[in-house]
Amino acid sequence: MILCEIFLLGCAFILCGLSVWTDLRHGQIKNKHLIIAFTAGLVLNVIYYAVYCQDCLGITALNLLISALLSIGFYFVHIWSAGDSKLMIVLISLLPGRLFWANTDTIVPAAYLFLLVFSIGYLYLIGEAVYLDFHCHTVKLPTVTKAGAWAAIKSYLHAFVVLYAWNSVLSIALPFFVENNVLLLSLISYFLITILREKPVYHSKVLVGSCAVLDAAVLLLTRNTIAAAGVLRMVQTYLLVLLVMWTTWIAGKYVYESVPTEDVKAGMILSRSTVVCFAPSKVKGLPQISYEDMRSRLTEEEAAAVRRWKDSKYGKATVVSVRKIPFASFIAVGVILFAAYHIVTTLGSWGI
């Protein structure tokens, strides 16, 4: 059994190393690495769960299923690339259930891994932002105006009203599930508010009014019985809304970089302002639209067309691209730290 666990962890660590290398060097994760790791893990997992850890199979399978749905969700909201999502799924499948998933009350213990990965990502964004500002000597505090401050307050209250209503409904309908799966529901709530903010329905008075009435009713009915769980739900909602707004601001401030047109490569994402400049050009194969997310990554043909565009009538020496956030590296580092913590904890429980 221990040999199976060692081999599974070995596959996970090797895949982490390869993914960091290819992500930083080539901006992508190789499918062949994922396939080899998944195939090796599949063989080891069949032996591991069929022979040694039958009692861990249920929680491991459920954890993997919901983790896969979360990973795919991050792909569909264009936060992760398909490679990032596949990497997360394969790595979670390689972590032995007895060491990582068995001794927990939550149905998705991998939610802690997701939290760790995003924490690393946020620390990276903060560090990079500080470095870029101080390195370029362009530290600029945001200009605060009365109109801007009022717009920010309204946006915050809007998001809070909607999210608090959602959390209240869950707490009333599924109290025991909510109590044992706070982190999982926080991830789902993050998805909800991130997706809704881009939809017209989010700005409808009917939705906001309905949520406000529901919030008021919940607060009124529980005013004499408010418990720690209710306070936690309110604080959690405050923090989630702040997190979504802060990440939106930081991403908008540091998302762009200038790139020599001759260095444009497949996989890059061009800004909307750059793609608009292609409209009058007669160069064939240029991208026609940019969503500034993973949907708009350049193909080899489009990248070649952009390089040709440089020497055309409307061409420019530089273009503006969307900065790539190396989530594959965050995932790999997060898995290594997550595994190290559980290994040390397990060895400690064995008295080693």
Image (tube, rainbow, N blue to C red):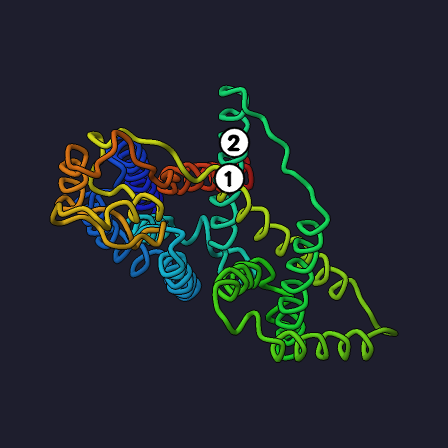
Work out whether residue 235 or residue 294 is closer to the camera in this orientation and state it: 294
Find residue 15 and report its horizontal and vertical position in percent: 28, 39
Position of 53 relative to 146 (above/below): below
| Residue corresponding to mark 2 | 129
Q: Is residue 161 left or right of residue 330?
A: right
Find residue 11 and report its horizontal and vertical position in percent: 28, 41
Q: Is residue 99 left or right of residue 184?
A: left
Find residue 344 and report its horizontal and vertical position in percent: 51, 36
Work out whether residue 289 or residue 188 is closer to the camera in this orientation and state it: 289
Mark drawn on residue 253: 1
SS at badge 1: helix
Q: CA distance from mark 1 to mark 2?
A: 9 Å
Q: Is residue 44 left or right of residue 92?
A: left
Q: Amino acid at mark 2?
A: Ala
Work out whether residue 299 or residue 229 is closer to the camera in this orientation and state it: 299
Quadrant of the rendered image containing residue 167: bottom right
SS at badge 2: helix
Look at the image and tell me whether residue 64 can be seen: no
Q: Earlier in the sequence, mark 1 or mark 2?
A: 2
> Label 1 crowding class (10 Å Cα cut-off): few <14, some 14-19, many 20+?
few
Q: Is residue 253 left or right of residue 36?
A: right
Disc 1 to disc 2: CB gap under 8 Å: yes
Who's the residue at 37% across and 51% down the image?
A: 80
* Total residue callouts: 2
Q: Amino acid at mark 1?
A: Lys
Who's the residue at 28% across and 49% down the image?
A: 83
Closest to the camera, between mark 1 and mark 2, is 1
> Label 2 crowding class (10 Å Cα cut-off): few <14, some 14-19, many 20+?
some
Who's the residue at 19% across and 40% down the image?
A: 306
